[in-house]
Image (cartoon, rainbow, N blue to C red):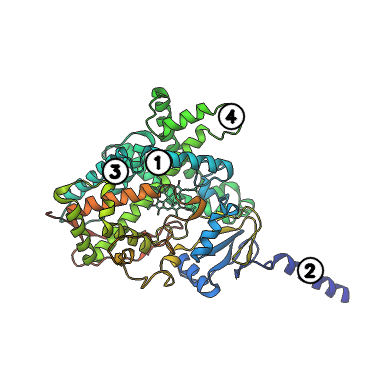
Amino acid sequence: MLVELLLFAVLVFLLWKTFRKPPGLPPGKWGLPLVGYIPWTSKSFEEQVMDLHEQYGDIFLWRMGTQLMVFIKDYKLMKEAFSRSEFTHRPNWEVLKFIEEVPHGIVSSSGIIWHNNRRFTLRQLRDLGMGKSSLVGAVQDQGLKLRETLAERAGTPGMIPHQLHLSLINVIWHMVASRQFDAEDERLHEFVKLLSEFVLLSNRLAIKDFMPWMQNVMPDFLFKRLIKYHELIDLKEKFMRYFKDETEKHKATLDPDNPRDLIDNYLLEMEAKKDDPETTCSEEDLLFIMFELFSAGSETSAYTFMWLCCYLAAHPEVQHKLHAEVDEVLPNGALPTLAEKPRMPYTEAVINEAMRACALVNFGVQHMAASDTQLGGYTIPKGAVVSSTVTSMHYDSLYWDRPKEFRPERWLDENGKFFMAKEGFLPFGVGKRVCVGESLARMELFIFTTMVFQSFSIAPAPGKSVNLTPDLRGFFFRKPVPNEFVFTVRKQ
Ligand code: HEM
């Protein structure tokens, strides 16, 4: 009997030693092996993370399935972490790498592939457009299309028109492949539909990322049905067909002395480096870079602009000041360029305040610790996934006076000049993987805001108020809920 008791005690001790939370890790929820900590609550994921910050402070961990997640809401700590090379890796998640063995492109890759693709893309974005007149012209063209659509339904209640998405996607097509689709083109509509299906379907892949063992305990066909594997493969093939077709057309018409766009430049770089053993250039990578520019660069700008419309409709006094500035700087329907930006501090302040208040990418994009390391006095083990709690930062009274109020004035100094108060502001991330499209997104938002509100005022549909509660169902975005607005034509 004594021997059995002793063996039992040893077994309990060994189990405790194996499954306990190792010392030195940040405080938080450890939970059970394989499943981690499963909360029993009807609160949204975002609310739960905010509650856990209340309980544990600026940094805490939450074991979700087999993934060790670390959440940070302290701006300085976040900046320190994401500026260090140990944290430049992405988790090897299917939801990011879109069911590829090796992650390609920029958003999902790590190491040398990421480094090379990021450098190439940043150079392209700079050379092909950001601040250059050809891209400004393309954004203005798309702003005009959006204005035409709004004019057609002026005075009638409705949602923000779908043309907003079409316009933003066309800006990226212009940069990538020197083409723009007509709003009536079926292929453009199919492409936009694929993008939104991708966001919905890819969420399913999180099951594989957080509970990979399920694949071993379930029949293969059932697991694939659960994660909608076949639909995803189909979606991926349809997407890639667009990019392959465009690449083939570019190959056939390429003039090495006159590269037209990102595809031409990548093909030339691939040719120039074909004998370089260090090159990571491949046609597959090109396709993924294109795919990621669309997936990272269209819905983000579209939702931000939709939020901006919500805030302006909810705050007529802010809209009034915006109209006054637009009318003064851009009289008689003059089209905006980036040259007007310095003279439009209130417009800049409205855009920044909308980005702060909507905290669109509420947990940023996740980074992974490439080795055991220390952060904020805690051990962060290799493989831990680090997330910034952007909503907490954007609503923290440590950084913002009366954070719940929509107040563009917080971005203006005593002389009315716009200043970029960066502390606590993280819409585009921070550090080595900060968004490569920030300047493009800012350009789109500036031109669309000035063009739309030069011509229209916005108000909630009669008898309704603006619902500013975010739709928190997706993991990556705080989307605005559908609101009905009336756009009314203004006389300048
Ligand atoms: C308002 C619009 C946008 C927002 C709020 C936004 C936000 C973000 C955030 C939070 C990240 C993650 C940074 C990190 O990993 O720490 C990111 C990365 C990225 N964004 Fe954006 N973005 C926007 C527009 C764009 C546009 C227009 C493009 C390009 C056309 C773009 C391309 C990318 C790419 C390629 C990455 C990955 C960078 C890397 O992993 O090195 N984004 N963005």
Work out whether residue 69 or residue 106 is closer to the camera in this orientation and state it.
Answer: 106
Residue sitting at 22 percent across and 56 percent down?
A: 158
CB-based contact (under 8 Å), mark 4 and mark 3: no
The residue pinned by badge 1 equals: 126
User: Residue 468, relative to residue 126: is it above or below?
Assistant: below
| Comparing labels 2 and 3, the label whose residue is closer to the camera | 3
The residue pinned by badge 2 equals: 11
Q: Which label number is shown at residue 139?
A: 3
Q: Considering the numbered disc 2 on the image, is that residue within a helix, a strand or a loop? A: helix
* Amino acid type indicated by mark 3: Val
Query: Within 10 Å of the Cα at label 1, are there few (<14), some (14-19), or many (20+) other Cα atoms?
Result: some
Mark 1 C-beta to ligand 1 under 8 Å: no
- Is tag 4's residue or tag 3's residue first in the polypeptide sequence? 3
| Comparing labels 4 and 3, the label whose residue is closer to the camera | 4
- Is tag 2's residue or tag 3's residue first in the polypeptide sequence? 2
CB-based contact (under 8 Å), mark 2 and mark 3: no
Q: How many numbered marks have been drawn onto this rendered protein structure?
A: 4
Q: Quadrant of the C terminus?
A: bottom left
- Is tag 1's residue or tag 2's residue first in the polypeptide sequence? 2
Work out whether residue 52 or residue 36 is closer to the camera in this orientation and state it.
Answer: 52
Using the numbered discs, state the Cα–Cα distance from disc 4 to disc 3 in whole angstroms.
37 Å
- Is tag 1's residue or tag 3's residue first in the polypeptide sequence? 1
Q: Considering the numbered disc 4 on the image, is that residue within a helix, a strand or a loop? A: loop
- Is tag 2's residue or tag 4's residue first in the polypeptide sequence? 2
Q: Position of residue 221 (x, y in %)?
A: 57, 46
Q: Position of residue 225 (x, y in %)?
A: 52, 49
Using the numbered discs, state the Cα–Cα distance from disc 1 to disc 2 in whole angstroms.
61 Å
Q: Is residue 425 left or right of residue 1?
A: left
Q: Considering the numbered disc 3 on the image, is that residue within a helix, a strand or a loop? A: helix
* Amino acid type indicated by mark 2: Leu
The residue pinned by badge 4 equals: 276
